Amino acid sequence: MLGIAEPECKIEDGKKSAIHLLGALPSIMGCWYLGSRGRPVSFDIGDKGYADYVMRMVKEEGQTELECQMMNASLILYAEHEFNASTFTARVCASTLADFFSPITAAIGTLRGSLHGGANERAMELISRFQNADEAEREVREMLGRKELIMGFGHAVYRLRDPRTAIIKTWARKLSEVRKDMRLFEISEAIEKVMWEEKRLFANLDFFSATAYHMAGLDTGLFTPVFVVSRASGWAAHVIEQRADNKLIRPMANYTGPKDREFVPIQER
């Protein structure tokens, strides 16, 4: 939509398009989420900052200062993270000299998958399944025994811990304490304990983000769209960098099928 409404006259560094994109994405999310519920959508960003505007686009009721502080931290933590699947997709698309919005669109499609951006939604589904920490500990051990996948643990880059986790976990605790509802946080900690004891896997950013977002009043279906708003700044930076010294990214594939195959003319079949 933005590529049509604001087409680039020429391929430039993309900074102007990036600024427009970051400003438009929360509004687009608000039109979808609030508008579909018959709620008014205010396009006045105001003077309280970007995180405050994002929160206004994802909550039908008012947001608190603490919730906005959590969102600000989350936007920073999710903003960029090397050559993950969606970022690599954006770089490949940008390398073809596509317009600025096409790489972002391609990245959004990649992020949507449950093994990437949808991981925090899957984590929320798991956490909300249990009534208390004891049940969570017992059931997760049984799930591991059945070799079921537990989302939100381990990382392709980090080997000892995810340094972002401690920050978002602190916010999850703060919001739970303010709401006087520690159940989900205690369940999350119980699962974290089991995964470390049984698999030596640490919680990544996605896992405690689920509890933090939920306690801030966000519907689970908004977790991945909020991730998109966060990561768009990182994608934009990568697109700008790709354009600065571009070369078409064209991976090669090695054929591993049969070497000798008999040719049979179609009329003889």
Image (spheres, grey):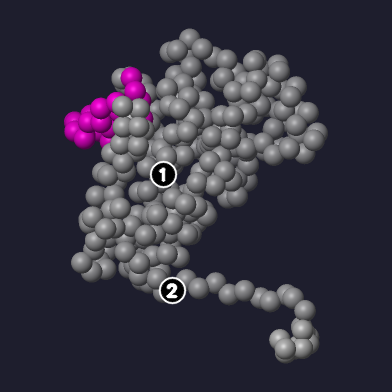
Q: Residue lying furthest right in this view?
A: 145
Give the image quarter of residue 229: top left
Image coordinates of residue 157 in percent, x first then y, are 58, 50
Image coordinates of residue 208 in percent, x first then y, are 53, 30
Q: Residue lying furthest front in this view?
A: 267
> What whole-number distance in Å separates the C-alpha atoms at marks 1 and 2?
25 Å
The C terminus lies in quadrant: bottom right
Q: Are marks 1 and 2 in contact (CB under 8 Å)?
A: no
Q: Is there any visible trace of residue 110 in the rendered image?
A: yes
Question: Is residue 151 found inside the magenta-colored segment of the image?
Answer: no
Most common SS among magenta residues: loop
Residue range in magenta is 39-61
Residue, x 32% and y 60% (percent of image)? Answer: 100
Q: Nearer the viewer, residue 147 or 3?
A: 3
Q: Is 8 on the left-hand or right-hand side of 69?
A: left
Residue 248's label in the rendered image is: 2
The residue to which callout 1 is attached is 228
Question: Is residue 55 found inside the magenta-colored segment of the image?
Answer: yes
Residue type pointed to by label 2: Leu
Q: Nearer the viewer, residue 251 or 99?
A: 99
Residue, x 27% and y 64% (percent of image)? Answer: 13
Q: Is residue 158 above or below residue 194?
A: below
Q: Is residue 46 above or below residue 94?
A: above
Q: Is there any visible trace of residue 26 in the rendered image?
A: no
Image coordinates of residue 39 in percent, x first then y, are 29, 26
Residue type pointed to by label 1: Val
Residue, x 57% and y 43% (percent of image)? Answer: 114
Q: Earlier in the sequence, mark 1 or mark 2?
A: 1
Residue, x 62% and y 37% (percent of image)? Answer: 151
Residue 126's label in the rendered image is: none
* Circle 2: element type: loop
